[in-house]
Amino acid sequence: MRMIPTTARTLSDDMSKRVLSLERLHVSFFTDAGELAVVRDVSLSVSAGETLALVGESGCGKSVTALATMGLLDHPGRIVAGDITLGDDVISGFSEPQMRKVRGARIGMIFQEPMTSLNPVFTIGRQLAEVLRLHRGHDDRAARLASLALLERVRIPAALERLRQYPHELSGGMKQRIMIAMAIACEPQLLIADEPTTALDVTIQAQILELLDELQKDLGMAVILITHNLGVVAQYAQRVAVMYAGEIVEQAPVTELFADPRHPYTQALLQSLPGTVDPGRQLNVIQGTVPTPREFPAGCRFATRCGEVLSRCASDVPPASRHGGNHVFSCWQRMESTS
Amino acid sequence: MSTAALLEVRDLAKHFALRRGLLGRPSGWIKAVDGVSFHVREGETLALVGESGCGKTTTGRAVLRLIEPSSGSVTFDGQELLKLNAGDLQRMRRDIQIVFQDPYSSLNPRMTVGNIVGEALRVHGIARGAELNERVAHILERVGLSPDFRHRYAHEFSGGQRQRVGIARALAMAPRFIVCDEAVSALDVSIQAQVINLLKDLQDEYRLAYLFITHDLNVVRHIAQRVAVMYLGRIVETAGTDELFDNPRHPYTRALLAANPLPDPSSPRPRALRGDVPSPLTPPPGCAFHPRCAEALAHCDRQTPTWIQIARRHGVACHLHQNTSRQGDDEIPDG
């Protein structure tokens, strides 16, 4: 056991294939009541062809991390420290016009609610064509042909007919396929999928995740899959970063994270799943609730709910420790008990 | 455990009329619930599972007459609920409560927690003044909230705390039966575990019966003794929970289980079911599942499958099992 600096550089398997890295990212919201440090010291990286799951409960900062990556943080949110690197470009320093060229072209995005991400007053064809005109400079005819090819690529039957339809005429699963078609229109290096199946039924969820998996293999995209569903994580990610209260508390390959979780939060989260105890028995719970950003402890942010808390936990931020080759976690108790 | 059903639902149907224009006649019918039968015993949890639009929520509300059913019968403790007049129904509602999915929209933002929880006690003239306060404080404590919370408003609380308020409201009347409509679905995993434990404790303590409506199969396996699977307004399979998970017979139940991602990287990848749920406006003829069914037979698109009791507590509506019926079995068709 040794302490290491939390740079993404030390976590990546293969630097040459690395598509995105966040290094020591800090995001704050500047409110009337003062600065709220909603994302603290987040480092992660994802390579071509790899799926990294960003998992955590509501309010843990996973969506804010994604928005920061896409340059979509709204006032009062701002990156206060850290670098975001896409390929060879440090995009955290990009201007908004520069970022507009990155989004859509080099980073594709899909969100939880395909209903709200599509414009209800335009046909599917028109919305797809707009993406293609904007990013690929297609004229009407080329855009139409490319749209048809895209719909076939996301396995939408009767593509020609779909182009003439409006979003409300399509099912939730179909709309999410349209969103995926738009996101991959420019064959991006990175796809950020923020709770892409949370609003969908389980049979449709399986279809959508299967499709994403297939497209990733075809296009060699890096994928960041943001979800709160540990079943989805277990089945579709290669690596996992667990977030709690704005921090990554643990990062590991998926089989290792589920078999040998090191951080007390990860352990408690996995143990609280129905199915870990016999039916009808009491489920294990994590006492209390996630603190609001205003209530975040100065040290380890899990300290207020942790069953193994030490005296220093509330005041000192635990450094990242390495457990084996590719497994990193931040916990005073575990670091000391294994050193 | 008593064997008589506390709640018995028979051939329940709710058809919504589609109207064109202001005074138009029905231009069609949506059969949201189309002949559903089941029962729930005292102290028991029956899970009603299925995907959105299958009619599980409408079923739960029709049982409580929050939506007036089109036909069928709902008996509670031997009394036919669908024939009760408003006054008798009001009295009966003490025994039958509901907890909703969304703890954000189901609690009145203008009422204090104390008023939300105590309202029914006041309306029914069961308690008032100091006694009401005391009972509300006691109920809040029972669901794991501080009695001091009764002076605060719902928006001041987190999702998990709000859901506890919703449960406290349902508990206030000391009911015997609660419809839990996706009661834990909107909650984070760690909070969900707390609320599931609470529901279980309350069930043991008060011998509550639950109709547990959910799409989350992992929760079903943990909390329910029996499961009924719905597809397009009908129950397609019922069985004891272990039996249903270990030995699912309807192709839809199998597909549902196969699509569920398990939180274990070594378990097999989910298998996707092809196609979308059809519109209930134009349900497929015959077995409504046949367009998506990998095992459909030649007559599945013409004949509606009848209910087949394949074991004492295991029933299915599927042509594949037409010849596996138990001879001379006269069981009620809900396991």
Image (spheres, rainbow, N blue to C red):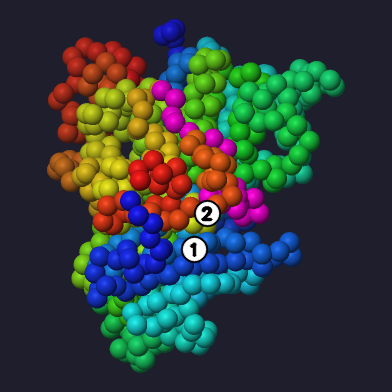
Q: In the rendered image, which quarter contains the N terminus of chain B? A: top left
Numbered tag placed on residue B289 in the rendering: none
Name the secondary structure under disc 2. Answer: loop
Spot occupied by residue B302 in the image (x, y as percentages of width and height): 23, 42
Numbered tag placed on residue A317 in the rendering: 2
**A187 to B53, vertically: above or below:** below
**B191 to A69, vertically: above or below:** above
| Residue under label 1 | A41
Q: Chain of mark 2?
A: A
Spot occupied by residue B277 in the image (x, y as percentages of width and height): 34, 50
Spot occupied by residue A172 in the image (x, y as percentages of width and height): 41, 58
- In magenta, the rendered stretch is A281-301
Residue neighbourhood size for the residue with mark 2, other residues' Cα within 10 Å, grouped as few (<14), some (14–19), many (≥20)? some
Amino acid type assigned to the residue bearing label 2 in the image: Val
Q: For the stretch drawn in magenta, what is the main secondary structure? A: loop
Q: Nearer the viewer, residue A218 or B259?
A: A218
Sequence-wise, the earlier of marks 2 and 1 is 1
Q: Is residue A180 magenta?
A: no
